[in-house]
Image: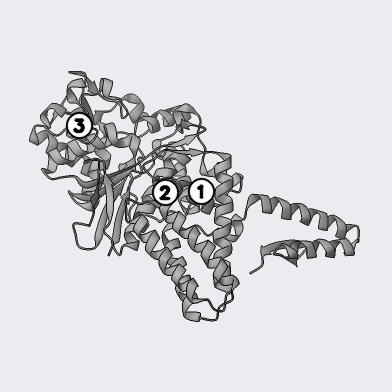
Amino acid sequence: MTEFRLFNTLSRAVEPFAPADGDIVSIYSCGPTVYNPAHLGNFRTFLFVDLLRRTLQLRGWRVNQVMNLTDVDDKIITRAVEQGKRIREVTEPVSEIFFADRDYLRIQPAETYPKATDYIPQMIALVERLVASGTAYQAEDGSVYFAIGRFAGYGRLSRLDTREVRSGARVAQDDYTKENAQDFALWKAAKPEDEQVEAAWDSPWGRGRPGWHLECSAMAIDLLGETLDIHAGGIDLIFPHHEDEIAQSEAATGKQFARCWCHGAFLLLDGTKMAKRLGNVKTVKDLREQRIPAAAVRHLIFSTHYRKELNLSEEALEGSIEAVRRVGQFKERLDDALGGTAELGEAADAAVAATSEALFDDLNAPEALAALFTFVRRGNAELDREGAEPEALDRAREAFARIDSVLDLVPDVEEEDPRLVAWVEERLAARRAARESRDFAQSDAIRDELKEQGIILEDKAGATQWRRAR
């Protein structure tokens, strides 16, 4: 079987990968901070992890994935104070939006979605281990900091030269840059606004709350063990978040925290990184309002390798809409065919081999897409020949199902091309007007026009529904 390989950020190399524990791959992937709906830049990362998960399953491994929900941090507290709410009243509605967006984009659910606020005892226990080991200390205000100077491996993930870090500075913020980073907060002493929004808990160091980096380490260790197979996230999390996770986890356990670190590149909007602070975000809601098929979004994201930046544009979306339309039509032809040619079976076998080889080589989705569309082109040509071999057709159907189990590019009926939807709705309006004026000849002519384009009308209880012909 083809060797499975992944790029490991820790080594900066593509390496052979296999799970440490038999056939189960443990994955921890950083999820959303639920103070605002996640944007498409976030979902590019989540879709890359979905591709990783499905490809591991294609390889024959089982997956145990944990994706956290950050439901307490600086941004959430600020938002709660602004709105006069408790943090839970901010995070729960946003979490529901995240799950709806996840389902719309057909992202396979993780096995566990822990909320940070449900793991406060585990976080406190981890801080206690770090204090006992001498790598963490309590400050005068009751906050507890991790001393990066006492952890020899600090900086190896991000390739940060700790000599460049400003000496003596302690960072209480969840987000910071290397210019002002030194010891980072594990446990933050409560402030009045924390108490106001119910974001403070009792601890051995007084009332307080966890730091963002601590949250992920505690949940990952509790749910997946002290050494993970894969830790995944966006490239922007390498420093400080993942660097700090490594430091506090390995200082506490004495074991390697993750065997492989996988990071996805940025999604750009008109050439600029998509970010909430820049105000240039596009959300899944925006795409749904434009009636962009989820399959087209998946195609667009997978058209560029996950480690390369991807620019989102209307032209690119239009191209992806057309691409998945072709995929859907090919599946319909496979479903409706009665037999195939020997060459159809050969095309199917070649497609399975090529897509597997591409995906097993560091998730090379663009090459997998190229193999799929070669199959679509060759397959359509062979279906035109109307072969009579059921075994060849079965191989083609099985090949398509295997490939699409990873890429998932067949549009749903309700995800039709928005241009087609607009045209159909316009013709239906004209047909309603003809019927209201009792011009039944024109009404029938419009029905026939739609039928010629593969659109079937069903008049029910005063309303007309339409569907694609099969």
Callout 2, which amino acid? Leu
Q: Which mark is residue 297?
A: 1
Residue 84: in sight, yes or no? no
Alpha carbon distance from label 3 to label 2 = 28 Å
Q: Are marks 2 and 1 in contact (CB under 8 Å)?
A: yes
Q: Are marks 3 and 1 in contact (CB under 8 Å)?
A: no
The image shows a total of numbered marks equal to 3
Residue at image coords 36%, 55%: 359
Q: Which residue is mark 3?
A: 155
The residue under label 2 is 47
Q: Nearer the viewer, residue 350 or 459?
A: 350
Of the residues shown, which amino acid type is indicated by label 3?
A: Gly
In the orientation shown, which residue stands out farthest toward the right?
438
Q: Which residue appears at 57% of the width and 71% of the height?
A: 383
Looking at the rendered structure, the secondary structure element under dot 1 is helix
In the displayed structure image, the side of residue 114 where residue 440 appears, left or right: right
Looking at the picture, how far across and down is residue 400, in whole percent? Answer: 46, 66
Above or below, 196 relative to 61: above
Residue at horizontal 24 percent and vertical 40 percent from the top: 12
Counting from the top left corner in percent of width and height, residue 70 is at 35, 40
Q: Quadrant of the N terminus?
A: bottom left
**Disc 3 or 1, which lies upstream in sequence?**
3
- The amino acid beneath tag 1 is Val
Which badge, 2 or 1, is on the more N-terminal residue?
Answer: 2
Task: Give the crowd class for mark 1: few <14, some 14-19, many >=20 residues within 10 Å.
Answer: many
Q: Say which element carries label 2.
A: helix
Query: Distance of mark 2 from mark 1, alpha carbons?
Result: 10 Å
User: Where does residue 222 sit, x and y in percent of width and height?
Assistant: 22, 49
